[in-house]
Image (cartoon, rainbow, N blue to C red):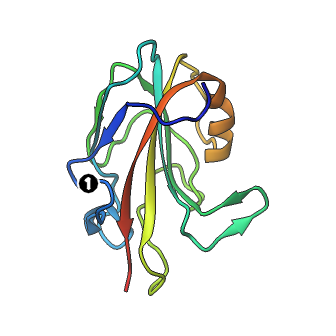
Amino acid sequence: MGFVPTSMQLTSSAFRSGEPIPKRYTGEGENISPPFAWQNVPEGTKSLALICHDPDAPLISPGTYGFVHWVLYNIPASVTSLPEGVDGYTKGKNDFGQQNYGGPMPPNGHGPHHYYFWLFALNQELNLAPGLTLWQLLQEIEPHCIGMNRLVGTYERL
């Protein structure tokens, strides 16, 4: 199918789409991942992956842009939500160079940044190794993606 948004829905009890992410979930707060829930996962889903990317970050390098805050995968299809501060499943490498959630922390006075939390439904259990970057993960899951959608939050440091 490729990367095309579907009717799958990703939500958080911490913020609504287009609204600010509470400080608790940022680098200025407790720096823990927000809670998430999803529904309308496509039939045939065997596993899920979730990432967070900030395309507003003023970083450009060969073949990429923005800043990756979170890469989480090998989530079983039976899972329909993640609690805040989730500490499970397989962790990829974020642009902080760590294998965990790294909350929003845009440059002071840079304006609001948009944080895209993307959920991917996959037609296979890929059992991918820990430590994949976002771009490595996308390369691995693209042939198996049968559904996806996003939740976008904002954050600004004055």
Image coordinates for residue 82, horizontal then vertical, percent: 30, 38
Image coordinates for residue 157, horizontal then vertical, percent: 38, 80
- Residue drawn at point x = 46 percent, y = 16 percent: 46
- Residue drawn at point x = 29 percent, y = 62 percent: 19
Residue, disc 1:
16
Total labels: the figure holds 1
Of 89 and 61, which appears nearest the observer? 61
Q: Residue furthest right?
A: 62
In this rendering, the answer to whether 87 lies above or below 57 is above
Q: Is residue 130 left or right of residue 49?
A: right
Of 23 and 115, which appears nearest the observer? 115
Of 90 and 35, which appears nearest the observer? 35
Q: Amino acid at mark 1?
A: Arg
- Residue drawn at point x = 47 percent, y = 34 percent: 148
Quadrant containing the C terminus is: bottom left
- Residue drawn at point x = 79 percent, y = 60 percent: 62
Residue 74 in sight: no
In this rendering, the answer to whether 88 lies above or below 114 is above
- Are there few (<14), some (14-19), or many (20+) residues within 10 Å of tag 1? some
Image coordinates for residue 115, horizontal then vertical, percent: 44, 59
Quadrant containing the N terminus is: top right
In this rendering, the answer to whether 31 lies above or below 87 is below
Kind of element beneath mark 1: loop
